[in-house]
Image (cartoon, helix red, strand yellow):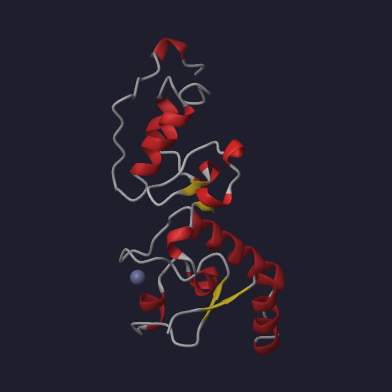
Amino acid sequence: MGFTPITIDKYVKKHLKSNPSTNEKELRKGLKSALNAYKNGVKCACGNDIWVIASASVGNKCFTCITGEAYPTDDYEIKGATEKAHNLRGRHISEIPPTKIAGFFDDDGYEINTDLIKKPSLCLTCLKNDDPHEEFLCNMTRYDQQNSDEFRCGAYQKIDDNSLPF
Ligand SMILES: [Zn+2]
């Protein structure tokens, strides 16, 4: 049970074989943007992870909402969207030479790819946005709230209106 992982290239080939009228460029574009959405934590309206392969053409929805079936059986999913818990994760701390350990790690000891952490819109009006000294703490706060609807931050400091360039 579950998805069979497949690379974008392989999937595109398969898809074109059975649907020769498909525009390859559009298909690739759709797959890439759906995969990005998945990696950024975009969910189906029902709260499930999106099914990247089908979301590329029907919009970001999960397997169940698209097919009406509870679980995938021998359906494909793009590699990178099949390992749920590892979305933002990099190497495990035990795989890294002790002298090279930097950045931060989740509770299970996996390196967190801070580039993939979503920046809430609140941060854009905060004095600390883009301050390299605050970045670590800001990322921790953002990471902790990845899956909550509303972002709250105890360290938020509104930019003084007078200092805004517009
Ligand atoms: Zn759904």
Q: Which one is nearer the viewer's eye here, 144 or 121?
A: 144
For ligand 1, give the image quadrant. Answer: bottom left
Residue 155 spot, x, y in % from top left = 33, 24
Residue 141 spot, x, y in % from top left = 36, 36
Number of callouts in the render? 0
Residue found 54% across the figure and 57% down from its top:
36
Residue found 64% across the figure and 78% down from its top:
11
Residue found 28% across the figure and 27% down from its top:
154
Task: Inspect this view and state whether residue 138 appears.
Answer: yes
User: Quadrant of the rendered structure where residue 46 is?
Assistant: bottom left
User: Quadrant of the rendered structure where residue 23 is?
Assistant: bottom right
Q: Quadrant of the image for the N terminus?
A: bottom left
Q: Which one is nearer the viewer's eye here, 52 or 163?
A: 52
Q: Please give left or right for residue 50 compared with residue 91 in the image.
A: left
Task: Inspect this view and state whether residue 92 appears.
Answer: no
Outermost residue, front side = 98
Q: Please give left or right for residue 47 compared with residue 119 in the image.
A: left
Q: Is residue 12 above or below residue 117?
A: below
Q: Is residue 40 above or below residue 61?
A: above
Q: Which one is nearer the viewer's eye here, 137 or 160?
A: 137
Q: Which one is nearer the viewer's eye here, 91 or 133?
A: 91
Residue 133 spot, x, y in % from top left = 49, 21
Outermost residue, top side = 162
Q: Is residue 134 above or below residue 19?
A: above
Residue found 64% across the figure and 82% down from its top:
15
Residue 73 spot, x, y in % from top left = 44, 87
